Image: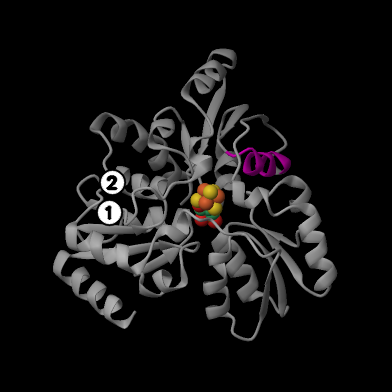
C-alpha cells in the first residue's frame, strides 16, 4: 500500500493533478485525497483549484459535474463504471410533461443525476443546500427530481409551495429501514440518531438530526454527546472517527454500502493517472445547457 501511495504522490506532481474524494469512498482513498467532502463542497472546490487535472474518487455524476463546471480541465474517473443508480431514475419525457402541465414550475434537480437530465433542469441542489435553495425560488410549483425522499423532506419544511415528486431513490438509503433503525436504538438507547435525507420519511421521523454527510460530521463533532447511530453510507465512518476519536459511532445495520463508491481503489487511481484515462467527456452542447442549473446552484447556495 505504501508503494501505491508514493506512486500516487509522484504522479500528482508529474501530471499536475489533484484528487477529490467523496466521504463514501474507501478509507485509504480518503486518506490519499487532497480534498474530501460532500457533493456540494466537492463541486465548489472543483471550481477553485489551480491544477490542470482533477482525479475524481466518486461516481460518474460527480465527475460529470466537475467537467461541466471546469471544461478546460481534464477530469478523470478512476473507474468509468462507478455510477449512481438514482441518477438514472427520471427521464426527459416526464420532465417535459410536467412543464406542459404547470406554468409556474421550477424543475429542481438533485446533483445525483446524469448530465443529460441536468440539461432539462432549472436549478441543481445537493442534500446540503436543497432546503435553502428551494426556499429562495420564486416559483409556486416545484418538480423535485430524481430523489423522492429528499424532495419529501424539503417539502415538509417549505409550506408555501406545491411539490411534485418523482419516484427515484437511493437503493442504499432505502435499505436503512425504520425497523432497522428502531433495532439499533434498542441496542444503543443513549445514542443520538443522525440521518441522511435520502432515507425514507419514516426513518427521518426517528432522527435527532437530519443532514448531508458533511452536516452529519459537523453535528457529531460539535455535539457534547458521545454515542451516535449513523443512518447513511458507511464510508462516512472514516471522517467521523478521525475527527472524534473519543466518540462511538454505530451503523444501523451491517450493510449501508454503496458498491459503486467502493469501486475506486488505489491501484485504479495509479493506472488512471499513468494513462490519463478514463476521461470524463461531456459534449459542448450538453455542457452549456447543464452548466446553467449547476451555476445557479453555486450562486444561490453562496
Ligand atoms: P451528500 O454528499 O450530499 O451528503 O450526498 C450523499 C450521496 O449520496 C452522494 O452520492
Ligand atoms: Fe447514488 Fe446512493 Fe451510491 Fe449516493 S449512496 S452514489 S445516492 S447509489
Relative to residue 227, is residue 189 drawn left or right? right
Relative to residue 266, is residue 153 drawn left or right? right
Q: Secondary structure at mark 2?
A: loop
User: Which residue extends farthest left?
Assistant: 14
Magenta region: which residues? 147-156
Mark 2 lies within 8 Å of ligand 2 (Cβ measured): no
Q: Nearer the viewer, residue 9 or 264?
A: 264
User: Which residue extends farthest bottom?
Assistant: 246
Give the x, y percent position of residue 159. 72, 36
Q: Which residue is mark 1?
A: 76
Mark 2 nearby-residue class (10 Å; few <14, some 14–19, many ≥20): many
Image marks 2 and 1: residues in contact by CB distance under 8 Å: yes
Q: Is residue 28 magenta?
A: no
How does the figure colour the protein chain or chains?
Answer: one colour
Q: Which residue is mark 2?
A: 280
Q: Secondary structure at mark 1?
A: strand
Give the main secondary structure, helix, strand or loop, of the magenta stretch.
helix
Give the x, y percent position of residue 85. 51, 42
Q: Which mark is residue 42?
A: none
Give the x, y percent position of residue 297. 45, 43
Whichever of callouts 2 and 1 sits on the residue coming sooner in the sequence is: 1
User: Looking at the image, which residue is at 49% across and 44% down?
Assistant: 112
Give the x, y percent position of residue 114. 42, 37
Amino acid at each position: 500500500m505504501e508503494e501505491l501511495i508514493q506512486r500516487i504522490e509522484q504522479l500528482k506532481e508529474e501530471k499536475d493533478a489533484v484528487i477529490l474524494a467523496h466521504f463514501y469512498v474507501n478509507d485509504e482513498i480518503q486518506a490519499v485525497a487532497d480534498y474530501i467532502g460532500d457533493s456540494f463542497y466537492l463541486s465548489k472546490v472543483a471550481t477553485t483549484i489551480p491544477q490542470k487535472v482533477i482525479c475524481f474518487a466518486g461516481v460518474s455524476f460527480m465527475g460529470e459535474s466537475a467537467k461541466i463546471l471546469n471544461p478546460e480541465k481534464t477530469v478523470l474517473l478512476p473507474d468509468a463504471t462507478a455510477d449512481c443508480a438514482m441518477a438514472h431514475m427520471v427521464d426527459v419525457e416526464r420532465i417535459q410533461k410536467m412543464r406542459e402541465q404547470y406554468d409556474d414550475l421550477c424543475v429542481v434537480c438533485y446533483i445525483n443525476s446524469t448530465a443529460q437530465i441536468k440539461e432539462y433542469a432549472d436549478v441543481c441542489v445537493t442534500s446540503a443546500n436543497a432546503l435553502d435553495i428551494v426556499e429562495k425560488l420564486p416559483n409556486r410549483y416545484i418538480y423535485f427530481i430524481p430523489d423522492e425522499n429528499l424532495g419529501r423532506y424539503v417539502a415538509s419544511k417549505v409550506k408555501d409551495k406545491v411539490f411534485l415528486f418523482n419516484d427515484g431513490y437511493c437503493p442504499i438509503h432505502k435499505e436503512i429501514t425504520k425497523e432497522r433503525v428502531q433495532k439499533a436504538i434498542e441496542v444503543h438507547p443513549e445514542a443520538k440518531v443522525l440521518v441522511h435525507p435520502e432515507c425514507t420519511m419514516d426513518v427521518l421521523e426517528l432522527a435527532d438530526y437530519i443532514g448531508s454527510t458533511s452536516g452529519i460530521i459537523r453535528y457529531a463533532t460539535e455535539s457534547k454527546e458521545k454515542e451516535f447511530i449513523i443512518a447513511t453510507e458507511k464510508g462516512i465512518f472514516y471522517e467521523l472517527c478521525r475527527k472524534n476519536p473519543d466518540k462511538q459511532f454505530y451503523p444501523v445495520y451491517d450493510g449501508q454500502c454503496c458498491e459503486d463508491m467502493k469501486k475506486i481503489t488505489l491501484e485504479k487511481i495509479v493506472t488512471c493517472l499513468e494513462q490519463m484515462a478514463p476521461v470524463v467527456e461531456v459534449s459542448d452542447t450538453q455542457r452549456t445547457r447543464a452548466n446553467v442549473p449547476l451555476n445557479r446552484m453555486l450562486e444561490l447556495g453562496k
